[in-house]
Image (cartoon, grey):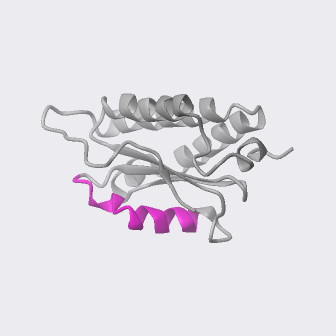
C-alpha cells in the first residue's frame, strides 16, 4: 500500500467535512500569527514529472505571488501520483532557504507513511506558520490576502 492509497479511492473532495474543517482551521490558526499566507491544493494527478513544476504552475494560476510581502506558501499534493511539493514565494524563500522546505517535505512524508494524512498536513501547516511568524510577524494592519479554503484540482 502506497503513502496516498487511502485517498485514491475517495470522491473528488478526498475528505470528510470534519477533516476539511480541521485543515482549514490549521491554516487559519497559522495565519493569525503572521502576515504570510498558506494555501493547500489537492488533485489526483500531477500534470508534470516534477511536482515542484506543477506547484509553480498552480502558484501562478492562484496568483499567490500577489501578496504584499511575497510571503505566500503553497502545499501541493497529487494523491494518485503520490507526489507533493511545498513552495514558498520569493520573500519567504529568501529568508528561509532550501533546507527548511526539504525538512518539511521529509516530515510530511514520514506522517504519510504512518497513514497520518490529516495530522501530517496540519503539522506542516503549523510548522510553516511558525516559520512565517518568525520572518513575517502579524501586524495590526494585516489582512487575509488569500482564501483559506482547500483548493481542489482535477
Q: Is residue 93 left or right of residue 19?
A: left
Magenta segment: 52-68
**Furthest residue in direction front, as rendered:** 11
Say if the magenta span includes residue 90. Answer: no
State the residue at coordinates (20%, 41%).
143
Does the magenta portion include 67?
A: yes
**Going by the image, does 21 lie left or right of 16?**
left
Out of 91 and 33, give the one closest to the viewer: 33
Residue 65 in the image: state x and y as whole percent: 32, 61
Q: Position of residue 46 (x, y in %)?
A: 64, 65
Residue extending farthest to the left is 141
Residue placed furthest toward the right: 1
Where does the image place residue 102, in percent across and percent down from the top left?
60, 48
Left or right of residue 109: residue 20: left
**Left or right: where 45 falls relative to 143:** right
User: Whole-percent x and y of residue 114?
Assistant: 77, 31
The answer to which of 35 and 58 lies nearer the viewer is: 58
What count of labels does the image hold? 0
* Vertical position of residue 103 compared to residue 111: above or below: below
Dominant SS type (magenta)? helix
Quadrant including the N terminus: top right
Above or below: residue 18 compared with residue 63: above
Going 33% across and 46% down the picture, which residue do you hit?
Answer: 147
Q: Looking at the rendering, in which quadrant would you find the C terminus?
A: bottom right
Amino acid at each position: 500500500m502506497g503513502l496516498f492509497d487511502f485517498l485514491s479511492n475517495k470522491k473528488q473532495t478526498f475528505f470528510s467535512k470534519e477533516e476539511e474543517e480541521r485543515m482549514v482551521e490549521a491554516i487559519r490558526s497559522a495565519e493569525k500569527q503572521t502576515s504570510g499566507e498558506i494555501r493547500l491544493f489537492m488533485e489526483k494527478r500531477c500534470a508534470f514529472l516534477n511536482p515542484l513544476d506543477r506547484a509553480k504552475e498552480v502558484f501562478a494560476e492562484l496568483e499567490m505571488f500577489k501578496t504584499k510581502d511575497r510571503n505566500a506558501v503553497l502545499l501541493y499534493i497529487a494523491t494518485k501520483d503520490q507526489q507533493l511539493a511545498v513552495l514558498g514565494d520569493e520573500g519567504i524563500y529568501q529568508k528561509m532557504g532550501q533546507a527548511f522546505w526539504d525538512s518539511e517535505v521529509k516530515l510530511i512524508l514520514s506522517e504519510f507513511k504512518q497513514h497520518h494524512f490529516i495530522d501530517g498536513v496540519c503539522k506542516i501547516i503549523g510548522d510553516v506558520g511558525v516559520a512565517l511568524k518568525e520572518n513575517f510577524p502579524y501586524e495590526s494592519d494585516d489582512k487575509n490576502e488569500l482564501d483559506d479554503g482547500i483548493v481542489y484540482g482535477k
